[in-house]
Image: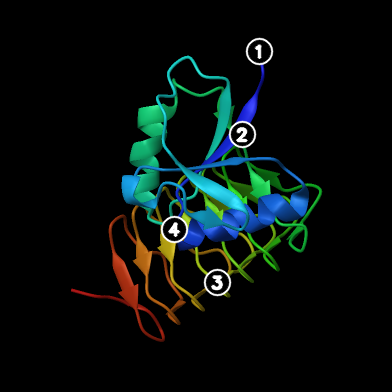
């Protein structure tokens, strides 16, 4: 059986993931469910309409920036693909003791520190820092230039906005959204929206 690799999602985030694959020398196909984009060329790759994946010989990567959409697609395709492959940009830094699960993306200049654990299908975007001993759940998005101090814990489907800072040891519940530039100084319950410096729950 011939094994192939695909990226699902040909938007802006898909372009970033594709660039990292090209730099890593990985041969991939590029799928999208928008038929109007079929045949467009993105970084030398023709966009294809997403095929039926049941019984396929594909490993996939969900290049979708929105956490809940990524979670839904995981549930839809988990039993239709051989597995999910992780993409780590060659200009990132991942500690040898860090654990990065299947389907994650680690962008250029991102840092994952010693003994950090990152759950599956999570995005560590450009310049983001996940420091030592952090625990990051599934389907999270750590946006560009944001920082998780040492020992931070994130639940699932958490969004940390661009440039936000989570102080060491803080615990963040499932589905929390932290606004760009916020500084989180205390634990946050599931579903909260945090903004400001210091960050407060937005009502």
* Local SS, label 3: loop
Residue marked by disc 4: 11
Q: Is residue 60 left or right of residue 191?
A: right
Residue sitting farthest toward the right: 96
SS for callout 4:
loop
Identify the residue under disc 2. 5
Residue 115: x, y in percent? 72, 50
Tell me if label 1 and label 2 are in contact, CB under 8 Å: no
In the picture, measured across the screen, residue 87 lies left or right of residue 139, that is right
Marks 3,4: beta carbons within 8 A: no
Q: How far apart, in angstroms, are the residues tagged by discs 1 and 2?
A: 13 Å
Q: What separation in Å lies between label 2 and label 4 (alpha carbons)? A: 18 Å
Q: Quadrant of the C terminus?
A: bottom left
Which structural element holds mark 2?
A: strand
Q: Nearer the viewer, mark 3 or mark 4?
A: 4
Residue 144: numbered disc:
3
The residue positioned 77% from the left and 57% from the top of the image is 90
Label 3 or label 2, whichever lies nearer to me, is 2
Residue at image x 71%, y 52%? Answer: 22
Mark 3 to mark 4 CA distance (whole Å): 17 Å
Q: Label for residue 1? A: 1
Give the percent coordinates (x, y) of residue 88.
69, 51
Q: Is residue 193 above or below residue 9?
A: below
Circle number at residue 136: none
Q: Are marks 3 and 2 in contact (CB under 8 Å)?
A: no
At 54% from the left and 59% from the top, the residue drawn is 15
Q: Quadrant of residue 132?
A: bottom right
Which quadrant of the structure image shows residue 131?
bottom right
| Residue 62 point in image, percent of width and height | 48, 43
- Which residue is painted at 51% across and 79% down in the image? 163
Of pointers 3 and 2, the one earlier in the residue sequence: 2
């Amino acid at each position: 059986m011939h094994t192939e690799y695909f990226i699902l999602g040909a938007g802006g985030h898909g372009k970033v993931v594709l660039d990292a694959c090209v730099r890593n020398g990985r041969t991939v196909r590029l799928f999208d469910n928008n038929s109007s984009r079929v045949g467009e060329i993105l970084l030398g790759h023709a966009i294809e309409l997403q095929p039926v994946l049941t019984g396929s010989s594909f490993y996939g990567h969900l290049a979708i920036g929105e956490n809940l959409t990524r979670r839904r697609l995981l549930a839809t395709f988990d039993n239709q693909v051989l597995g999910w492959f992780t993409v780590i940009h060659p200009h990132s830094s991942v500690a040898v003791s860090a654990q990065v699960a299947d389907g994650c993306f680690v962008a250029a200049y991102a840092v994952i520190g010693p003994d950090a654990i990152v759950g599956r299908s999570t995005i560590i975007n450009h310049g983001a820092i996940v420091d030592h001993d952090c625990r990051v759940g599934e389907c999270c998005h750590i946006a560009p230039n944001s920082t998780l101090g040492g020992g931070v814990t994130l639940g699932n489907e958490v969004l940390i906005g661009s440039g936000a800072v989570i102080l060491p040891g803080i615990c963040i519940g499932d589905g929390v959204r932290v606004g760009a530039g916020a500084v989180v100084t205390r634990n946050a319950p599931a579903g909260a929206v945090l903004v400001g410096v210091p960050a407060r729950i937005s009502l």
